[in-house]
Image (tube, grey):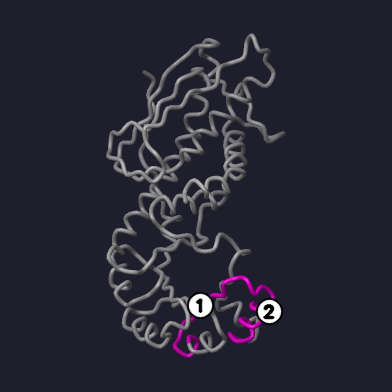
């Protein structure tokens, strides 16, 4: 599943890495990274070769292999773009000792780099920024998933992602054992309070959604039992119970009786996940997975 997801992500990865490298290198006139803009790396003699290792200083779930690979691919391409065959720089060799989704202990060597010393140093920060952030997302997700072990409740992410990293963080959630909710505003309906008010009611909103896009899942956020009944009567596929207590959720699950899937959201901290899962919901969603990210502490050292 992860490899299939990566294929879909490849365009996003390439575009995001180009943007991040241009940001770091001060390039504003195009979208092509120019490695020669790294004025500190240019202090190193031309064609100096080096070997470097990257370790994690914390236990973590690894995520970001493709992003690291793309950083050095683009830098290699940048350096070789205007050189002759005789003077071209050999591609950076990256040897991975771990895979995305793998649980590793602190002080584990994640990968080794071998190649042009300037390139290794120019790409270091951008590569580690992606790896530490995505691994942080995967690691937090895995901690939440462990709390749901033994239940039928699945953990969902949200659209509360870091700007520009939506697809990357959604992939990181998968690596941590979570499940993706809708990717954006285009692939599923989530009808909330303001939508309901603007449409004239729950039944009108659901009917219009099914008429406009009959192939899309229609989810309705409800705050009361009356709204729950309206959403079920309207034929919603999923119901989001917003800030319901566990006792209220048990009642809502019984009232639904398989008519729709039930999701709970709103301040879903790791400490209360089990209590809500016991209530029998299908999904628990948490924005914390992608917005409360503690990056993993990584370190790169030349041998």
**Which of the two residues, 179 or 227, is positioned nearer the viewer here?**
179
Q: At 41% across and 43% down in the image, what residue appears?
A: 100
Q: Position of residue 295 (x, y in %)?
A: 39, 44
152, above or below 183, in the image: below
Mark 1 = which residue? 221
Q: Quadrant of residue 113?
A: top left
Residue 273 quadrant: bottom left
x and y percentages locating residue 283 in the rendered image? 41, 69
Residue appearing at x 46%, y 82% in the figure: 223
**Residue at the outermost right position:** 29
Q: Is residue 214 magenta?
A: yes
Element type at mark 1: strand
- Badge 2 marks a residue whose secondary structure is helix
Q: Quadrant of residue 152?
A: bottom left
Q: Residue at x 37, y 36 (%)?
A: 98
Label 1 packing within 10 angstroms: few (<14), some (14-19), many (20+): many
In the foreground, 56 or 91? 91
Residue under label 2? 211
Residue 208 lies, with reference to residue 265, above or below; the image says below
State the extent of the magenta-drawn residues as a range.
Answer: 201-228
For the image, the number of numbered tags is 2
Q: Choose mark 2 or mark 1, whichever is in front.
A: 2
In the image, residue 208 lies in the stretch drawn in magenta: yes
Q: Position of residue 259 (x, y in %)?
A: 47, 83
In the rendered view, does 6 fall on the left or right side of 299? right
User: Where 293 falls versus 303 (above or below)?
Assistant: below
Estimate the x, y position of residue 164 in percent, counting from the top left: 57, 49
Mark 2: give few (<14), some (14-19) or many (20+) Cα within 10 Å: few
């Amino acid at each position: 599943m992860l490899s299939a997801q990566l294929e879909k992500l490849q365009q996003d990865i390439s575009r995001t890495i180009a943007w991040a490298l241009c940001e770091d290198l001060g390039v504003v006139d195009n979208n092509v990274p120019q490695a020669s803009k790294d004025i500190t790396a240019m202090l190193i003699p031309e064609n100096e070769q080096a070997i470097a290792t990257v370790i994690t200083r914390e236990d973590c779930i690894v995520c970001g292999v493709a992003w690291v690979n793309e950083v050095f691919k683009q830098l290699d391409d940048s350096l070789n773009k205007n050189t002759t065959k005789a003077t071209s720089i050999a591609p950076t060799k990256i040897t991975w000792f771990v895979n995305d989704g793998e649980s590793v202990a602190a002080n584990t060597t994640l990968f080794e780099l071998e190649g042009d010393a300037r390139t290794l140093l120019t790409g270091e920060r951008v590569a580690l920024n992606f790896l530490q952030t995505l691994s942080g997302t995967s690691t937090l997700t895995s901690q939440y998933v462990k709390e749901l072990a033994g239940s039928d409740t699945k953990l969902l992410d949200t659209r509360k992602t870091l700007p520009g990293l939506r697809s990357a963080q959604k992939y990181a959630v998968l690596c941590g054992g979570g499940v993706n909710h809708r990717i954006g505003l285009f692939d599923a309906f989530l009808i909330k309070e303001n939508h309901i008010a603007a449409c004239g009611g729950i039944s009108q909103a659901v009917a219009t959604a099914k008429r406009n896009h009959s192939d899309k899942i229609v989810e309705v956020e409800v705050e009361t039992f009356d709204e729950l009944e309206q959403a079920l009567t309207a034929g919603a596929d999923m119901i989001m119970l917003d800030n319901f207590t566990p006792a209220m959720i048990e009642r809502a699950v019984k009232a639904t009786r398989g008519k729709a899937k039930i999701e709970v959201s709103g301040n879903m901290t790791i400490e209360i996940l089990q209590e809500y899962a016991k209530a029998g919901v299908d999904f628990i969603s948490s924005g914390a997975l992608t917005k409360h990210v503690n990056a993993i502490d990584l370190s790169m050292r030349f041998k």
